[in-house]
Amino acid sequence: MWGSKENYPSLIGPSNFQVPRMGGAKFVKEIEHNHRQALSHIDQNIVGANLIPCLVYKAEFEGKFAAQLAQQCPGALSEAKKLTSLVPKPSSLEGCTIKDVEYEDTTDGGVPMFVQHTAAMLDEVDRMEEEIEMEDVDEPVIDIDSSDLKDPLAVVEYINDMIAYFRKTENSSCVSQTYMAHQFDINEKMRAILIDWLIEVHYKFELMEETLFLTVSLIDRFLERQTVVRKNLQLVGVTAMLLACKYEEGSVPLVEDLVLVSDKAYTRKEVLEMERLMVNTLQFNFSVPTPYVFMRRFLKAAQSDTKLELLSFFIIELCLVEYEMLKFPPSLLAAAAIYTAQCSLYCPFERWSKTSEWYTNYSKSQLLECSKMMAAFHQKAGTGKLTGVHRKYSTWKFGYAAKAEPAHFLLPL
């Protein structure tokens, strides 16, 4: 790349680069003269030097630079404050000659102009930070029903009353988190195995989402009121799904189909007898709010897309298997599932908006305990023996939602 001397005559030629000859008295005198001249310049720089203040346009500096400093370089603010505190006052500059610096009369003896500019800039930064915080506090609540005014299926005129009624009556669908202690032949693990199997049956029959949540609700409410022996636990699950299908589905599976999926462990007569016992025990009360009705409303408030919706349902179906999640009401489970899914998709940022808080009536702090448990279930979903939900949501139909990373900052250390 670099050529010969002839290619760059202007750079290394004699006119630009002259070296005095070595040796001789003339060379020694030149060295001594240059040395004294350099020392005189150093002395002038130390004593009696003139400080030329920087000229700053106040409006442009405080407006543009302060805004950029506050929004893009938050760390620079603290550094600027530290540097300002280190600037010496005029009283501490004894022995030094400083010229051409403008002062104003103040109680502490005057402040240099550049210090005044810095202080004004910091005041502007503080003011802008307060405005940004006020904007966050004043985040508007979006009317999620305004776009559906002409859609009769959205029932905009009644939806708020319906959700209010569900919130009022959701305790009727809750069961005691200690009801299993009254069962002498079954336990929490057997319940988990049953529901995990029913999730696969539900997927195989391609039933509606509402049917699954109502099935689990019927099982828990029945077991809270009726003791069941171990060999009939699967019969309870099959019958609960049959009743949920009759309540939710347009096309109900045949009893023979349910007997077949249970490997013919029960007869048609046994299924119908269990059906009669179950409806009498529950007094035909099937119209109870499940987490599903809240999920649909809260997902709309979260302005969800398909990815968030699938991951939210994956998380809440994991909770159906877990007995310990019975201590949370359905509305809290739905809100926490959506919040946990948001934390998983948008980690490390949390996205619980004012709109979501308004329509769910739950703040982020109220969801935290439940969300931490959900994140732990998400982390271990593909391990162990009960992997029905994980396999279901590992398919293309459900967007491979099970492959999403859990919200790590919600997991215990």
Image (cartoon, rainbow, N blue to C red):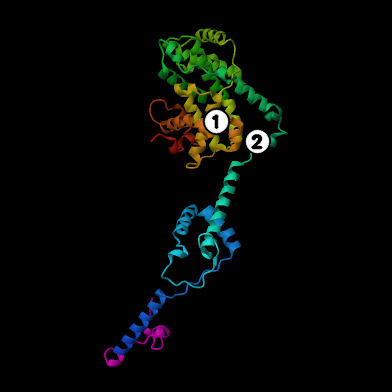
- What is the x, y in percent for residue 2? 38, 77
Q: Is residue 208 visible?
A: no
Location of mark 2 (residue):
144
Residue 105 lies, with reference to residue 333, above or below; the image says below
Q: CA distance from mark 2 to mark 1?
A: 16 Å
Determine the main secondary structure of the stretch shown in magenta. loop
Q: Which residue is mark 1?
A: 335
How busy is the neighbourhood of tag 2: few (under 14 within 10 Å), some, or many (20 plus)?
some
Residue 172, compared with residue 8, is above or below; it is above
Locate residue 283 relative to residue 412 in the image: left or right.
right
Mark 1 is surrounded, within 10 Å at the Cα level, by few (under 14), some (14 to 19) or many (20 or more) other residues, namely many
Residue 26 among those drawn in magenta? yes
The amino acid marked with disc number 2 is Ile
The magenta-colored residue range is 1-27
Q: Which mark is residue 142?
A: none
How far across and how far down the image is residue 374, in percent?
Answer: 46, 30
